Amino acid sequence: MNRSDSVIILPGGIGTLDEFFEILSLVLIGVHDRFIFLMNTNNFYSLIIQHLKHMVSSDFIHDLERLETKLVVLTEPKDLIPYLPAIQ
């Protein structure tokens, strides 16, 4: 995690959710300053996204600007391409 520029969360199981929430927590408290790309293919993470919005509206996530800036929800792998640095 310390050597990455960003994190891509693909559909997965409990371990994936554990890692997602760990990096999300570290980004939200300012330990890391990287983008988190959540690949919501076939609406796999739609309920998680809905719950995150509920957490914001319930005042359990306070840095909404940081969340909206650093967490990028994508639906297709090709949507990631504009975020990749140009290959020289």
Image (cartoon, grey):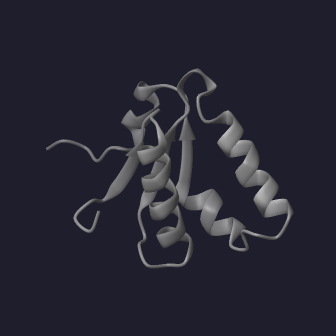
Q: Quadrant of the C terminus?
A: top left
Q: Picture coordinates of residue 53 (x, y %)?
A: 77, 52
Q: In the rendered picture of this protein, how many numbered marks are placed on residues? A: 0
Residue sitting farthest toward the right: 58
Q: Picture coordinates of residue 26 (x, y %)?
A: 47, 71
Is 41 left or right of 4, judged from the image as shown? right
Identify the image quadrant of residue 42.
Answer: top right
Identify the image quadrant of residue 1.
Answer: bottom left
Question: Which residue is found at the position 53% from the left and 59% from the top?
Answer: 70
Is 34 left or right of 67, judged from the image as shown? left
Q: Is residue 58 above or below residue 20?
A: below
Identify the image quadrant of residue 77.
Answer: top left
Residue sitting farthest toward the top: 42
Question: Which residue is found at the position 49% from the left and 69% from the top?
Answer: 27
Q: Picture coordinates of residue 37 (x, y %)?
A: 47, 46
Q: Is residue 26 above or below residue 10?
A: below
